[in-house]
Image (spheres, grey):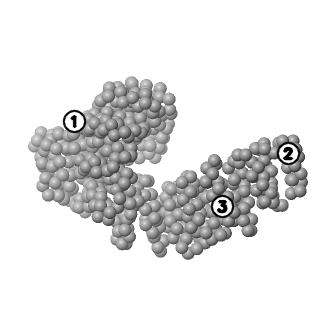
Amino acid sequence: MQELKQVHAFLIKTAQNHEPVVATELLRHSATSDFRDIDYALSLFDEMPEPDCFAWNTLIRALAETHDRPLHALLFFCNMVSDGMVEPNRFTFPSVLKACSVLTRLEEGKQVHGLVVKFGFSGDEFVVSNLLRMYVMREEGIVVLCNVMVDGYVRVGNLTAARELFDRMHKRSVVSWNAMISGYAQNGYFLEAIELFHRMQMEDLLPNRVTLVSVLPAISRLGAIEMGKWVHLYAERNKIKIDDALGSALVDMYAKCGSIGKAVQVFESLPKSNVITWNAILGGLAMHGKAKDVFDFFARMERSGISPSDVTYIAILSACSHAGLVDKGRSYFNHMVNVGFVPRIEHYGCMVDLLGRAGYLEEAKELILNMPIKSDDVIWKALLGACKVHKNVEIGRRAAEVLMQLAPHDSGAYVAISNIYASSGDWDAVAEVRLMMKDLDIRKDPGCSWIEIDGVIHEFLVEDDSHPSAKEIHSMLEEISNKLNFEGYRPNTTQVLLKMDETHKESVLHYHSEKIAVAFGLISTTPKTPLQIVKNLRICEDCHSSMKLISKIYNRKITIRDRKRFHHFEHGSCSCMDYW
């Protein structure tokens, strides 16, 4: 240490002591060497005009590891955060958490944990391991520890490990339930999220506002309107404040569950002080094909003084796409750029979808090739889907080739180009694509539909006969088929893009998942009861034509939400006006 002080004296003499690299090295040696001198290190730190994060971390670590100085480490960290000149990094928190452990200061540790989350390090393995070590120090911390571990597993996508730990917990707080429900919902396990939400109530644990915000996206995705209504009623009865977050989630839920009128009603009851709330209603209206309402609400939003976000323009462009308003879409896209927004891949995706649906395939392709950001698989899928609709083999082949490079194991590109070849009668090309899929072990995503009856969600796949009511469903499907034929309907077998005889093609169309769901709905509800179905894929032309007639024959309003939008079938017509 004496030699270090001599070096320091020489640097002062030669006016080099304030050089950042030199000052940092002096600090490191005085604070971390075997002959460390903490007080001397502190004096060196005080001389530094603008200490960086490394300098702060060096002192915090040295103080935390010195026998009588852990409290000073915490105070030093507080100074760092309150000073605001330098943000802590992933190497700051382990030393601070170690100081909390040594001092057995659980409350301070919880506050540090909050900062870990705030600064985005809750998924960092190095930081989390120190969090766990801190929480183990007291029995009270064990519950918190388990919650942290469940949340940590969820954040990194390891839901199996999270659920195993969750199930082993002897005492589960609302925090652990929320983490697990949110994890399932965010990772696409919607049925599991809802099942856990039900189990939570059975164990007499009251959901809080975070629980409701966490489960509503799962309810939305499955179109479980009755369950969504229950959540809304629960919030009102228990006087849970419906703020922007919960209110927006409710608006989104009602819109995605097909009740756009109720979504508007909830929206009108909210303060509407946040752009997120406006985006929720704009996105919902767009999904229902209500372009004029989207434009009207957007104008209201601007008049109220709320500035749009980039998400706002995604909703507007999506509305233009669903309505086929090409010129309007171009105008809004240009307006967005003119007011200072830099278009994201989602905005370009909306434009490609808009142009592609309207048949401007060459322009859509050129937009992708010339946009200033790197294209992704989603935007090429939009172009490929448009090529399928308009039976454009040339551009479709090009889009499929790019997709196979971007996402080689995604079945979408292979299935779409195979369908384009099939629709043009090129069965040799179809065989080649299917052989390629077999060699790469790529399987097509099966069509799947959900319908909620009396609060229970029923799931159906193509040609599904696994339901307990399969016999009754089959009888209803036969009845539907006979009534459709009497009305003059003939199956659109061009939608079956497989090489087989016409009779077999008609049979395949007969058992599409949404038709099975409708049949189950008809046998499970009283006459005139509206039916609401969610489908994971785009509804085919044959099912679309069938649903129009079924709504007329059985005098039912049938709502189907497919991968793209809502279709409201009533009195023999559809709200999309056959443009989807």
Q: In which quadrant will I find the C terminus?
A: top left
Q: Is residue 114 left or right of residue 12?
A: left
Q: Is any part of residue 493 visible from this angle?
A: no
Question: Any mark on residue 11, and which?
Answer: 2
Within-10-Å neighbours for mark 2: few <14, some 14–19, many 20+: some
Q: Position of residue 389 (x, y in %)?
A: 31, 33
Q: Position of residue 398 (x, y in %)?
A: 43, 29
- Which circle, 2 or 1, is nearer the viewer? 2
Q: Is residue 416 left or right of residue 137?
A: left
Q: Point out the tag, 2 or 1, that comes first from the N-terminus.
A: 2
Whole-angstrom CA distance, mark 2 to mark 3, is 30 Å
Residue at x-position 45% and y-position 38% = 377
Considering only vertical position in the picture, is 93 above or below 482? below
Q: Amino acid at mark 3?
A: Leu
Numbered disc 1: secondary structure: loop
Q: In which quadrant will I find the N terminus?
A: bottom right
Query: Pointer 2 and pointer 1: residues touching (CB < 8 Å)?
Result: no
Q: Nearer the viewer, residue 431 or 524?
A: 524
Q: Is residue 152 left or right of residue 36?
A: left
Question: Any mark on residue 75, and which?
Answer: 3
Q: Point out the tag, 3 or 1, that comes first from the N-terminus.
A: 3
Residue at x-position 14% and y-position 58% = 526
Q: Point out the tag, 2 or 3, that comes first from the N-terminus.
A: 2
Q: Is residue 532 left or right of residue 426?
A: left
Within-10-Å neighbours for mark 1: few <14, some 14–19, many 20+: few
Within-10-Å neighbours for mark 3: few <14, some 14–19, many 20+: some
User: Which of the 4 quarters of the picture holds residue 214?
Assistant: bottom left
Question: Any mark on residue 577, and which?
Answer: 1
Q: Nearer the viewer, residue 183 or 548?
A: 183
Residue at x-position 68% and y-position 65% = 71
